[in-house]
Amino acid sequence: MVLNYLRMRNRLIDDVVIIALSVIVAIVIVKTGLIVKFINLTQGIWFVNSFVAGMFFTSVFTTAPAIVMLGGIAQYSDSVISVALIGGLGALCGDLIIFKFMRDRLLEDITYILKRETGKERLSSILKLKSFRWFTFLLGVLIIASPFPDELGVMMLGFSRTKTSLFIPISFVFNFLGILAVELVAKAII
């Protein structure tokens, strides 16, 4: 029992450190202007820019620069569909990283914590209800489809225990649609 507690506590500490490091890296990328430097370096290679912008489209810390980047790419591209397809692939890669972390480790850690707390067994049993899984699944898909950052939606799909084989097409299709909407708005405004 004590060994299990120590193992889970160490995993939770690892998870917090990973999240903190990813936040620091994202802030450094935004503050140093690495995105702008990257666009200038790969000027004319729209598919590389689209893929990278798609990866940045998924994170709460990099969504705003990614939207600006995708809008700029849309201005110079002949096909917003092509940009959205490549950007959707990049977003899928970013979402897969988040999904694997959320579903496999964080969900287990949160469930363990909820079970350890007194009076929280009810909440733990709610997490296992089929209706809760469907609700979190649908809400997660809607969040991914929106231009909002995907972390919350991916976390909800993790809570619903969505299989990777189902997550991949969902993430791609709904990120594609979100990126396409951003590009169409950018083309209409500018």
Image (cartoon, helix red, strand yellow):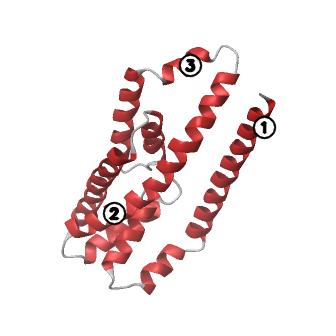
SS class of the residue under badge 3? helix
Residue 153 x %, y %: 43, 42
Q: Is residue 66 above or below residue 13?
A: below
Local crowd at mark 3 within 10 Å, few (<14), some, or many (≥20)? few
Residue 78 x %, y %: 19, 76
Classify residue 130 by image quadrant: top left
Query: Which residue sits at x=69%, y=42%?
Result: 12
Q: Which residue is mark 3?
A: 123
SS class of the residue under badge 2? helix
Q: Which residue is mark 1?
A: 6
SS class of the residue under badge 1? helix
Q: Nearer the viewer, mark 1 or mark 3?
A: 1
**Residue 89 has which mark?**
2
Q: Amino acid at mark 3?
A: Leu
Q: Amino acid at mark 2?
A: Leu
Residue 3 x %, y %: 78, 35
Contact (CB < 8 A) between labels 3 and 2? no
Figure quadrant of the C terminus: bottom left
Q: Is residue 24 left or right of residue 59?
A: right
106 or 55: nearer the viewer: 106
Residue 102 x %, y %: 53, 44
Q: CA distance from mark 2 to mark 1?
A: 39 Å
Upstream in sequence: badge 3 or badge 2 = 2
Classify residue 161 by image quadrant: top left
How many labels, in total?
3
167 or 53: nearer the viewer: 167
Q: Amino acid at mark 1?
A: Leu
Query: Which residue sits at x=54%, y=49%?
Result: 101
Q: CA distance from mark 3 to mark 2?
A: 36 Å
Figure quadrant of the N terminus: top right
